[in-house]
Image (tube, rainbow, N blue to C red):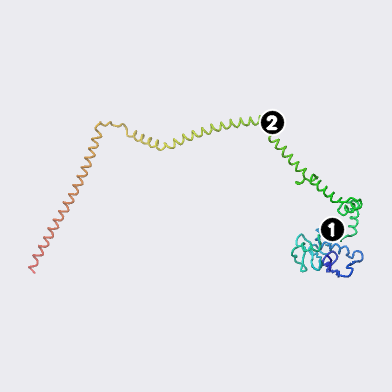
Amino acid sequence: MRIQRLDLLRYGCFTDTHLELPVSDSDIHIVFGPNEAGKSTALSAIEDLLFGIANNSPYNFLHDYGSMRIGAVLENSGKTLEVRRRKGHRDTLLTADDVPIAGGNGVLTPFLAGADQIFFARMFSLDHERLSTGGREILEAQDEVGQMLFSAGAGLSGLRDRLKALTGEADGLWASRRAAHRKYYQALDRLDGAEKALREHTVTANKWQEIKLAYDDAREAYGALEKQIEDISSEQRKLSRIRRVYQDIKKITALEEEIAGLGEVVPLPEDARPKLEAAEREQRRQREAAGDERQLRQELLCGQRNAEARNRLQLVEGSTAIAEPAS
């Protein structure tokens, strides 16, 4: 990858500044200038363009975080890509029109050839502070580059890989910070679980005695409850029987009071029933005879009325016959 043009649009002390880096025979460009001219700012802009502007970037003293913009035209294997970068957490890689670029940071992958920010900073973005820090790390062999240089100088091949493997193995066994993947804490959890299960299933003499007393008390309470339930059920059955016969008893009581109100009952002779039935039959017969008599009287009355009507008709006809010859 090579940079054809670096656009310092709004970054640090720069505003709408463009650094053209055309192709030449040697294809090496030297940027020089006095102190505080912005050389380190331009170097930092390249790293921020490729990997994102840091949350606490110090280059917002002229342009606020929201308006900060870096851009560049990148070349790789005959292809060019013009991009811009804004500060933010997502969709920070933009097109030349300042809209999120399709594919996001993935479009830079072919241009970076697998380099991450740490590698890029060590190889292509060194400043005085990073050179001093790198020297100390080489002496202390605390990072990958330092370890590689120390291994080469000491004649110990594969030291970095071996240290990395041992560090990973040690981290998987134990660390001061608890983690589920560490075997020590896995074993500790199993031990705690086993001890808890053992305590839960261990019955001492005192605990057995407590359980036995509780069991006896529960049985006694259960018996008392059963007796109470039986008493209540018996009372309920008694009340149900009373409720069922209450109306009948009420009627019987009313009839007894009515009978008592009749006074002393005169005893009837033994043939009272046949006599009563004969009297009832005679009463019915007389009612029927009386009905027949009323019907006969009505019929006679009707006949008498008919005879009187015929007589009056004959009288009228006779008067009519006498009056006709006179006329």
* Quadrant position of residue 98: bottom right
* Quadrant position of residue 79: bottom right
Q: Residue at x 17, y 51 (%)?
A: 299
- Placement of the C terminus among the 4 image quadrants: bottom left
Q: Residue at x 46, y 36 (%)?
A: 240
Farthest residue, direction left: 325
The location of residue 284, given as percent across then percent down, is 23, 42
Callout 2 amino acid: Thr
The location of residue 209, given as percent across then percent down, is 66, 29
From the viewer's perspective, is residue 322 above or below residue 291? below
Classify 10 Å Cα crowding around label 1: few (below 14), some (14-19), many (20 and above): few
SS at mark 1 in the image? helix
User: Contact (CB < 8 A) between labels 2 and 1?
Assistant: no
234 or 305: which is nearer to us?
234
The location of residue 313, given as percent across then percent down, is 13, 60
Classify 10 Å Cα crowding around label 2: few (below 14), some (14-19), many (20 and above): few
* Quadrant position of residue 262: top left
From the viewer's perspective, is residue 254 above or below residue 174? above
From the viewer's perspective, is residue 282 above or below residue 105? above
SS at mark 2 in the image? loop
- Placement of the N terminus among the 4 image quadrants: bottom right
The location of residue 32, given as percent across then percent down, is 91, 66
Find the distance from the CA under tag 2 to the CA under tag 1. 65 Å
327 or 215: which is nearer to us?
215
Look at mark 2 in the image and give the residue it sits on.
204
Q: Earlier in the sequence, mark 2 or mark 1?
A: 1
Look at mark 1 in the image and give the residue it sits on.
119
- Residue 160's disc is none
37 or 78: which is nearer to us?
78
Tell which tag, 2 or 1, sits nearer the viewer. 1
Callout 1 amino acid: Phe
